[in-house]
Image (tube, rainbow, N blue to C red):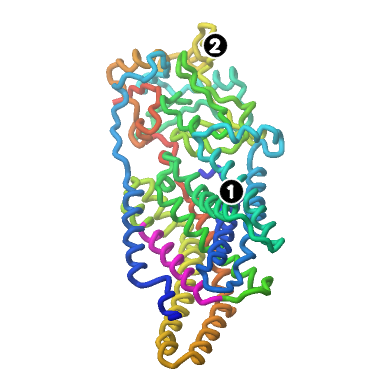
Amino acid sequence: MHHWNWLIVIYLFLGGLGAGAYLASFAAEKRWLGRNSHLARIGYYLAAPIVAFGTLLLVFDLGQGLHKPWLLIRLIFNFGSVMTWGVYILAAFIVVGLLKAFFVFKKKQAPQVITLAGAVLALATGAYTGLLIAVIEAVPFWNTLVMPILFVVSALSTGLSLTTLVAHFMEKEGSANPLEGKVHLALVAAELLIVAIFFGMMALGFKGPVGAKSASLVMFGSYAIVFWGYFIALGLLLPLVVFGREYLLAKQSAPKVATEGASTGKETAIAAEAEHSSYLVLATDLSILIGGFALRALIIFTALPIWDGKLL
Amino acid sequence: MNSSKKVLLTRRSVLKAGAVAAFALAVGITPTVVKADTAQDAPKNPLQKGFIYDQSKCINCKMCVNACKEVNQWEEGTVWRRVLAGGKDGKHYLSYSCNHCEDPACASVCPVLAYKKRDEDGIVIHNPDVCVGCKYCMFACPYHVPQFSPATGRINKCHFCYERQDKGEKPACVSACPTRALNFGLLSDIRKTSGATAQLEGMPNPELTKPSWVLIPKA
């Protein structure tokens, strides 16, 4: 019984992706991803257009999107509806994101307030995509605070991946940095932990028998291949192994930096940098995007209603 | 500058973050305990009206459904009232439409305020002329009441024949019922009927939306 189709899945995915791309460049600008990062601009360019495109898809999914589009202004009316919050958040994020991208394009320093507002709105956009479904009590599988948390972490991860991918081919300034790998490792590990706890508790019936049924539909039912193959293996385990290996290699060479002096240290740094822009890393980023999309599809399509409409 | 001091991620910080995340998740996922005894509670609005359905009187003739369809001109693809059959013998029925809930989930999630709950009788009316067809209410309603018409691109649902009621007439379904299995009245009155409940086995907990319906199950 799913009333929402692929357009909504793509919309939820793109909302998180655009928000995550903004935050990837925001982190790079703040030097949280190392000095001279090649991610400092690309994410800002990607963010608003991606979210705007996703929003456009949503309009097509509305029954009146093409019939009576003027009715859509009413979407801002109900301050108690999470969907209304989303309209405000998305609209604000698209505007602020475009402003920030304009400053970056003009190579001017954007006012701090714009950059920061964009970051806050990006987090809000990511959280909104999860909160939209988390407040639906009649769908136990959705109805936990895990949804916004999971969607934000997935947004950060997919956003970082897309920005890395596009930067590799388009960005001439800056360079790949092993810190990106570490941050991404942390994100993927956190997501895996959240997913494990979420499915564990759902399967144990913490949200009743319907929640457990949804979980088993995902893990052992008709969606098992999408779950284990696309989401868990491609989206989480492969990145965990690739970024984890990179992290361990960097760690092994770290003592050398301290003992063997500057020249070797520099070589190791260059090696690590090369490591983090290898085709394996790019392939991993692509597989993270696939996993992130699979997650949205799984969550939307396996949502069983609290009552199946049958009389016992 | 010593580069080893710039490590953002230590094993300890990861473990700490993990523990905090696990705790937050555990709190977030804990279900709320609900009690299922609304049938006896006094309604918030003393003027709230509701349907009362006596399962042992129903003969599954579907006159209620046909009358509703005829009077309300259902838009293509929508069903306002239906009769379910179940039980071990397949001869337990349930005729139901909108429950005009005390806490209507449809109305609280609707972004365009298409739903109105009337003060004078608690009827929940959906205005299809302002509906944008987002289908959010279809997920929110535990009873699958809001119906989407692909032909018109908007939601339709039972409005308790409020226009007939305003003229002092009965809802079409109630008028059509030959056995008096389906009736309506002031919720505070009909809840006093002996054997009354607000939930059948396997159906949503009435604490979710506080439906304004009274059911008298067949033994």
Tell me the amino acid under the disc marked 2.
Arg
- At label 1, which amino acid type do we have? Ile
Q: State the CA–CA distance, disc 1 to disc 2.
A: 39 Å
Direction from residue A165 to residue A141 in the image, left or right: left
User: Does dot 1 land on a helix, a strand or a loop?
Assistant: helix
- What residue sits right under mark 1 in the picture? A8
**Which residue occupies 63% across, 30% down?**
B76
> In front here: A259 or A198?
A259
> Residue A114 at x, y = what percent?
60, 52
Please indicate whether residue B77 sits to the left or right of residue A179 in the image.
Answer: right
State which chain disc 2 sits on: B
Q: What secondary structure prevails in the magenta region?
A: helix
> From the viewer's perspective, is residue A72 above or below residue B27?
above
Q: Secondary structure at mark 2?
A: helix
Q: Which residue is mark 2?
A: B164
Question: Is residue A181 shown in magenta?
Answer: yes
Residue A49 vertical position relative to residue B126 in the rendered view, above or below: below
- Residue A27 image position (x, y, % from top left): 53, 64
Q: Specify the farthest residue to the top.
A: B168
Q: Is residue A55 visible?
A: yes
Task: Give, as a single range, the part of the protein colored magenta.
Answer: A177-197
Instruction: Look at the image and say whether residue B176 sits in the magenta stretch.
Output: no
Residue A301: x and y, percent? Answer: 51, 50
